Image (spheres, helix red, strand yellow):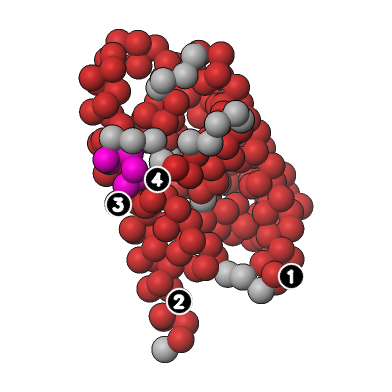
């Protein structure tokens, strides 16, 4: 039983460090700060539902999916890094990214990208899920999925409370948060890109 608790704690801490719900709450606030609370709740719910099913899919079928399409985690890191950098660049400039500024179903676009993928269900989260689920058989898959579901719930609660934070800091505060998060996202994107390229180069040498 103690081994089970230790594994649960290990998986939770691993996911928490990779997914970083506290930092992503600030990113969520910067991305959807101009929307109503109802829209923010809708975006948060969609983003985390999508995130959960993405991680569930890779936990169950990760190796088969990568083998089927002939792709690697390194390629995912490089592509995800580019996307996150573009979003961060536009936010750093004080504008919403054109990647998620379409009219109409804007909240759907935001929920899918950049929130669900690649910010929440990014290469690191996918790699972590595949590692935990592959190393423990059926029990490993159950623990991985269950722990990640709990983390999604925690992140959802953090996202909902982000609206109250926005109400306190106002428009000027939102502008500052947007630019700061843009810088952070740009750096994260660059780091993801560098990690992917470095890993790829090391496999070639």
Q: What element carries label 4?
A: helix
Q: Nearer the viewer, residue 78 or 107?
A: 107
Residue bearing the label numbered 1 = 68
Q: Estimate how packed mark 4 is, as few (under 14), some (14 to 19) or many (20 or more) residues with alpha carbons within 10 Å.
A: many
Image location (x, y in percent) of residue 53: 69, 42
As helix, strand or loop, the secondary structure at mark 1 comes to: helix
User: How far across and how far down the image is residue 114, in percent?
Assistant: 50, 42
Q: Locate residue 143: give its quadrant.
A: top right
Q: Which residue carries the number 3 mark?
A: 187
Q: In this view, does 40 lie above or below 53?
A: above
According to the image, label 2 marks what residue? 200
Task: Tell me which segment is drawn in magenta.
Answer: 87-93
- The residue that mark 4 highlights is 87
Which quarter of the image is occupied by the C terminus? bottom left
**Gap between marks 2 and 3 measured at Cα:** 20 Å
69, above or below 95, in the image: below
């Amino acid at each position: 039983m103690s081994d089970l608790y230790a594994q649960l704690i290990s998986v939770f801490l691993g996911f928490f460090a990779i997914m970083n719900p506290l930092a992503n709450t600030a990113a969520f606030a910067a991305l959807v700060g101009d929307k109503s609370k109802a829209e923010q709740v809708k975006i948060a719910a969609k983003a985390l539902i999508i995130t959960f099913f993405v991680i569930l899919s890779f936990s169950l079928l990760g190796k088969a999916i990568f083998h089927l399409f002939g792709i690697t985690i390194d390629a995912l890191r490089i592509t995800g890094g580019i996307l996150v950098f573009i979003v961060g660049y536009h936010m750093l400039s004080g504008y919403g990214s054109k990647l998620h500024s379409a009219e109409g179903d804007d909240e759907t676009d935001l929920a899918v990208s950049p929130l669900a993928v690649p910010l929440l269900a990014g290469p690191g989260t996918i790699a972590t899920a595949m590692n935990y689920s592959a190393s423990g058989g059926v029990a490993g898959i159950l623990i991985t999925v269950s722990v990640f579901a709990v983390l999604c719930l925690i992140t959802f609660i953090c996202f909902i409370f982000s609206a109250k934070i926005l109400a306190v800091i106002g428009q000027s505060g939102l502008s500052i948060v947007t630019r700061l998060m843009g810088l952070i996202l740009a750096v994260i994107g660059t780091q993801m890109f560098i990690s992917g390229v470095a890993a790829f180069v090391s496999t070639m040498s």
